[in-house]
Image (cartoon, helix red, strand yellow):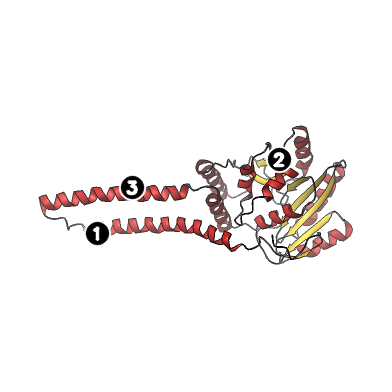
């Protein structure tokens, strides 16, 4: 019998977990031809999330939990889940029910019948989300497709069903700055996609602020593209060539009209423009250097505080 391990990252989700668990229990009863394991990753929650998970575990041995010592972020939570699940098929889904568990039977049938290594999901609408956030998301995906070799389609989710070969390939990527949506495409393998309408949160509030999403997007771009560095180089080359033309122009104007010192105001604006571009370029280079700085530290992706999974708490992942 196949076993599907479900990885559910949680951060202050005490309101949504009971709803999600009831739905997962219902789906598992429908899919009685496979075995299930529910792996909740408590990402340093400050509410009663961990207490609730312990209570669920006392009534259902399928419920496993890993609790971090602090909030390490969703990427670390997903990595921890992938590291310790034992199913031959693995799925990642959000605790807020925006990744509908009702899709699991279809995902399983597709991966079995189509001989796929991975079956992804994609939202075809963003109904209920702020308009500005939707526009920013579309712009991000368009930029990613243009400047990187990683084809991330608009609306793609972390929610997907993967076989063990696919999971092991993701785990083989050891970088500290993880952008899992890019990793899915980078490792390759045979993948298909299932589309669905957007589903609103079942309870609670989103933990993603606009600044958090913006930072996450920038990390994704930097992780999978060097185009920003190329752009800064081209801008520098352009202004170098432009400066040569201005030097020649000033020399000829001084020789002919003897008033090359005029125009201090416009010169000030040009200096401010060039200075701003230089600082912007240095900032982009600094982002890449910061990624290198974090990588060479060699720090663990997460630290486990408490768990009922058979892991060595002293092992750094």
Q: In the figure, residue 41 lies in which quadrant?
A: bottom right
Q: Residues within 10 Å of mark 2 (few under 14, many from 20)?
A: many
Q: In the rendered view, does 242 fall on the left or right side of 285?
A: left
Report how far apart the C-alphas of labels 1 and 3 lie in the structure.
Answer: 23 Å
The residue pinned by badge 3 equals 238
Per the model, the C-alpha gap separating discs 2 and 1 is: 61 Å
Find numbered disc 2 in the image and state the secondary structure of the residue it sits on.
strand
Tell me the crowding category of disc 3: few under 14, some 14 to 19, or many 20 or more residues within 10 angstroms, Cα based.
few
Q: Residue at x 58, y 59 (%)?
A: 295
Q: Secondary structure at mark 3?
A: helix
| Residue at the spot of label 1 | 265
Apparent side of residue 28 relative to residue 99 in the rendered image (left or right): right
Eye-nearest disc, 2 or 1: 2
Q: CA distance from mark 3 to mark 2?
A: 45 Å
Q: Which mark is residue 118?
A: 2
Counting residues from the start of the chain, the first of labels 1 and 3 encountered is 3
Give coordinates of residue 112: x percent, y percent: 78, 35
Q: Is residue 233 visible?
A: yes
Along the line of sight, the residue nearer the viewer: 224 or 133: 224
Q: Are marks 2 and 1 in contact (CB under 8 Å)?
A: no
Q: Residue furthest top?
A: 114
Q: Residues within 10 Å of mark 1 (few under 14, many from 20)?
A: few
Give the secondary structure at mark 1.
helix
Q: Earlier in the sequence, mark 2 or mark 1?
A: 2
């Amino acid at each position: 019998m196949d076993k599907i391990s479900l990885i559910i990252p949680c951060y202050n989700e005490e309101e949504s977990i009971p709803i999600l668990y009831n739905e997962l229990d219902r789906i598992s009863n429908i899919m009685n031809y496979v075995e299930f394991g529910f792996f909740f990753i408590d990402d340093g929650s400050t509410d009663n999330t961990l207490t609730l998970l312990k209570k669920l575990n006392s009534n259902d041995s399928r419920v496993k939990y890993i609790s971090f010592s602090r909030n390490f972020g969703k990427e670390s939570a997903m990595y921890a889940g992938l590291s310790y699940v034992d199913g031959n098929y693995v799925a990642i889904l959000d605790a807020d029910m925006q990744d509908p568990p009702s899709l699991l039977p279809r995902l399983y049938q597709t991966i079995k019948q189509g001989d796929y290594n991975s079956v992804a999901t994609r939202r075809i609408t963003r109904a209920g989300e702020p308009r500005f956030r939707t526009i920013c998301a579309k712009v991000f995906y368009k930029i990613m497709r243009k400047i990187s070799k990683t084809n991330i389609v608009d609306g793609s989710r972390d929610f997907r069903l993967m076989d063990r070969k696919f999971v092991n390939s993701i785990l083989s990527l050891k970088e500290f700055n993880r952008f899992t949506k890019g990793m899915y495409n980078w490792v390759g393998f045979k993948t298909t996609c299932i589309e669905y309408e957007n589903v609103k949160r079942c309870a609670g509030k989103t933990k993603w602020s606009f600044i958090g999403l913006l930072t996450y997007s920038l990390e994704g771009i930097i992780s999978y593209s060097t185009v920003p560095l190329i752009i800064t180089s081209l801008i520098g080359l352009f202004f170098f060539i432009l400066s040569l033309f201005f030097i020649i122009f000033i020399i000829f104007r001084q020789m002919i009209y003897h008033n090359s010192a005029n125009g201090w105001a416009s010169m000030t604006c040009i200096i401010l423009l060039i200075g701003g571009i230089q600082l912007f370029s240095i900032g982009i280079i600094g982002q890449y250097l910061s990624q290198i700085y974090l990588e060479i530290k060699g720090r663990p992706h997460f630290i486990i505080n408490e768990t009922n999974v058979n892991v060595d708490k002293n092992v750094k992942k």
